[in-house]
Image: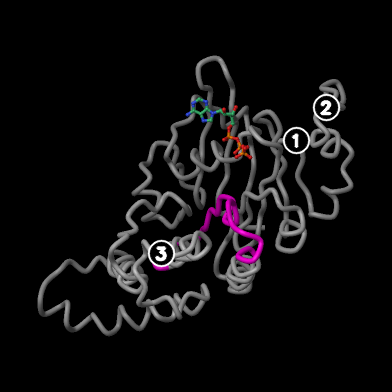
Amino acid sequence: MEAIIQTEDLSISFGGHVAVDSVSITIPSKKFTSIIGPNGAGKTTFFNLLSGQLSPTKGSIFYKEEEITKLSTTERTRLGIGRSFQITNVFPNLTVLENVRLAVQSQKKVRYNMIAHFRHFKQFEQKSYEILEKVFLLEKADSKAVNLAHGEKRKLEIAMLLALETELLLLDEPTAGMSLEEVPAIIDVIKQLKQEDDRTIVLIEHKMDMIMDLSDEVLVLFHGELLAKGKPEEIVQNETVQSAYLGGMYDEKQLT
Ligand SMILES: Nc1ncnc2c1ncn2[C@@H]1O[C@H](COP(=O)(O)OP(=O)(O)OP(=O)(O)O)[C@@H](O)[C@H]1O
């Protein structure tokens, strides 16, 4: 199976605390991989290492077999690694459509110039509408971003991520902080992305039903280490994983 991203012995420490500890994994291309683990297991830190927001204390990261360990976040995005919720360039006073159009435009690297602007405008707008339809946000196209509900903002972030056309999508708890009514819409968006098999998705989630429903493979982090990996049905049956989630009952000797 072709790997899109690979880590070797990847570690990061904050002070004396090892948040990600010698993690060597392979994320298969065009598959849906989920990363689970109890609070503080190192999941978000691991994503930050993949996307370039943090530099590892040791170890290496490879994207399509090229080493990217020292590349910046922008360089990694350009290569095809897109991370949700790092998008800070949502303009609150622009409409949803305008925000997505700017993201489409930035991906096409078209700088502002009167003639090019008019020529490309319709094309960018068309693409933006298509993306908004995909994330079930079409009816909010003309609303200002600032006026969106929490779940809708998350959908806008996913829309902007899609506009960047990255091959790899790193989604960090896309349903976190949402009301129960908002969750199904985001799950629908992610399912739809999964069906478009030209993308590789890596999802951090706590909701096990979502993990079971969407994942081809699940990686379990615990205390910064890779505790287990396998198909979702194998992971839920894995006794070591169950013990880790039960906290106090976990015995480190079981792993050695
Ligand atoms: N910038 C930082 N400085 C110091 N410690 C950090 C930093 N970032 C993360 N940590 C620590 O690293 C550990 C892993 O945190 P991380 O946020 O990656 O866990 P997580 O698995 O994503 O947790 P959650 O499921 O609660 O989001 C935690 O103990 C956290 O306090």
Instruction: Indicate the position of residue 82 as horizontal and vertical percent values.
Output: 45, 55
Q: Is residue 208 located in the magenta-colored stretch of the structure? A: no
Looking at the image, residue 223 sits to the left or right of residue 49; the answer is: right
Looking at the image, residue 83 sits to the left or right of residue 27; the answer is: left
Q: Residue at x 10, y 76 (%)?
A: 114
Q: What residue is disc 3 on?
A: 160
Q: Is residue 177 located in the magenta-colored stretch of the structure? A: yes
Label 1 SS: strand
Q: Residue at x 24, y 80 (%)?
A: 121
Instruction: Indicate the position of residue 3 as horizontal and vertical percent values.
Output: 60, 53
Q: Camera-side residue: 115 or 71?
A: 115
- In the rendered structure, find residue 38 and report the number of the disc placed on it: none
Disc 1 marks a residue whose amino acid type is Leu
Magenta portion: prevailing SS class:
loop
User: Residue 202 appears in which quarter of the rendering?
Assistant: bottom right
- Quadrant, the C terminus: top right
- In the rendered structure, find residue 255 and report the number of the disc placed on it: 2
Classify mark 2: residues with Cα within 10 Å, few (<14), some (14-19) or many (20+). few
| Rendered position, 58 above or below 212 | above
Q: Earlier in the sequence, mark 2 or mark 1?
A: 1
In this rendering, the label closer to the viewer, 2 or 3? 3
Q: What residue is disc 1 on?
A: 227
Instruction: Indicate the position of residue 127 as horizontal and vertical percent values.
Output: 37, 79
How far apart marks 2 and 1 lie (CA) works out to 8 Å
Q: Camera-side residue: 97 or 104?
A: 97
Disc 3 marks a residue whose amino acid type is Met
Disc 2 marks a residue whose amino acid type is Leu
Looking at the image, residue 209 sits to the left or right of residue 138; the answer is: right
Q: Earlier in the sequence, mark 1 or mark 3?
A: 3
Q: Which residues are magenta?
A: 163-183
How far apart marks 1 and 3 lie (CA) works out to 33 Å
- Quadrant, the N terminus: bottom right
